[in-house]
Image: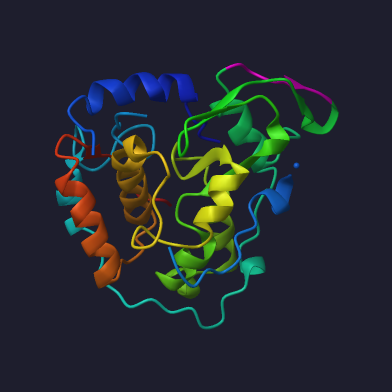
């Protein structure tokens, strides 16, 4: 399995990349019911190993590469995406793998990968968390949004791969349950992290994940991302196409 870099390393990279920008609770922990409404710097976003352009694309150029499409919710069921699997057979499901890799202070691993101790920082709201059960693992592109944007055409195997994507360090992020559930299945038109300083990174992560999985963006979503890009001129996006 491709392993994600720790949050401490990612944070160090963020400061370099965007100096000029300022604009198992298990399944329950990632529950995102359908919604009907809405760090001070960012890094190149996407899979370790870089994207199709060395050094990354400017955020605005990356947004321009997003396929255009009309969202389709028909037939969506959360169970269409099998998630929190033990992909590499080491006893730790995807949720635990993300928590281990993103911890600023590593938790202890007990039987069946039970985690105790540890410290995390939720970048959506800059909250430090010392109990894993208070964190949700957020799918950067919510499962419903992924379905709407093209995953409805995928095989069950590809949807499972998407829901457990450890091959890109920002596809899944550990954040406070409060912010994850506030986000629900909303796109950047209707939801952004409560910490304004996180907006550039969030826009890059969102765009990189859509490009990685070749998911489309509708007109309103694209317009919201372009507006964010205008406030984030130094943000770059790296991504690697998912297999």
Residue 60, position in %: x, y? Answer: 16, 49
- Whether residue 88 appears in this view of the structure is no
Q: Position of residue 183 (x, y in %)?
A: 50, 55
Is 176 included in the stretch rendered in magenta? no
92 versus 218 height, above or below: above
Q: Position of residue 50 (x, y in %)?
A: 30, 35
Vertical order, 66 against 46 (above or below): below
Between 88 and 212, which is closer to the camera in this rendering?
Answer: 212
Residue 168 on image: x %, y %: 44, 40
Vertically, is 216 above or below 125? below
Q: Is residue 182 above or below residue 36?
A: above
Q: Is residue 77 visible?
A: yes
What secondary structure prevails in the magenta region?
loop
Identify which residue, 123 or 93, lies in the foreground.
Answer: 123
Looking at this rendering, what residue extends furthest in the right direction?
Answer: 111
Q: Residue at x 43, y 40 (%)?
A: 170
Magenta residues, start to end? 105-110
Residue under the image location 36 percent in, 56 percent down: 210
Task: From the viewer's perspective, tell me whether residue 42 is left or right of residue 129.
Answer: left
* Extreme residue toward the bottom, this view: 74
Question: In the picture provided, is 224 more to the left or to the right than 9?
Answer: left
Number of labels in the image equals 0
Q: Quadrant of residue 49?
A: top left
């Amino acid at each position: 399995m491709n392993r994600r870099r720790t949050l401490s390393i990612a944070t160090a990279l963020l400061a370099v990349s965007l100096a000029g920008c300022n604009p198992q609770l298990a399944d329950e922990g990632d529950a995102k019911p359908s919604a009907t409404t809405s760090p001070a710097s960012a890094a190149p976003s996407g899979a370790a190993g870089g994207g199709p352009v060395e050094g990354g694309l400017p955020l605005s150029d990356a947004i321009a590469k997003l396929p255009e499409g009309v969202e389709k919710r028909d037939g969506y069921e959360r169970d269409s995406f099998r998630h929190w699997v033990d992909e590499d057979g080491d006893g730790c499901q995807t949720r635990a793998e993300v928590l281990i890799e993103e911890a600023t202070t590593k938790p202890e691993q007990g039987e069946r990968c039970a985690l105790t101790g540890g410290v995390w920082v939720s970048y959506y709201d800059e909250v430090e968390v010392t109990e894993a059960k208070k964190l949700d693992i957020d799918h950067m592109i919510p499962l419903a949004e992924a379905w709407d944007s093209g995953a409805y055409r995928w095989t069950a195997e590809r949807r499972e791969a998407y829901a457990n994507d450890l091959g890109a360090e920002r596809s899944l992020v550990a954040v406070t349950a409060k912010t994850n559930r506030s986000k629900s299945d909303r796109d950047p038109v209707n939801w952004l992290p409560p910490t304004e300083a996180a907006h550039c990174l969030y826009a890059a992560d969102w765009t990189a994940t859509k490009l990685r999985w070749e998911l489309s963006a509708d007109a309103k979503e694209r317009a919201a991302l372009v507006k964010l890009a205008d406030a984030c001129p130094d943000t770059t996006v790296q991504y690697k196409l998912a297999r």
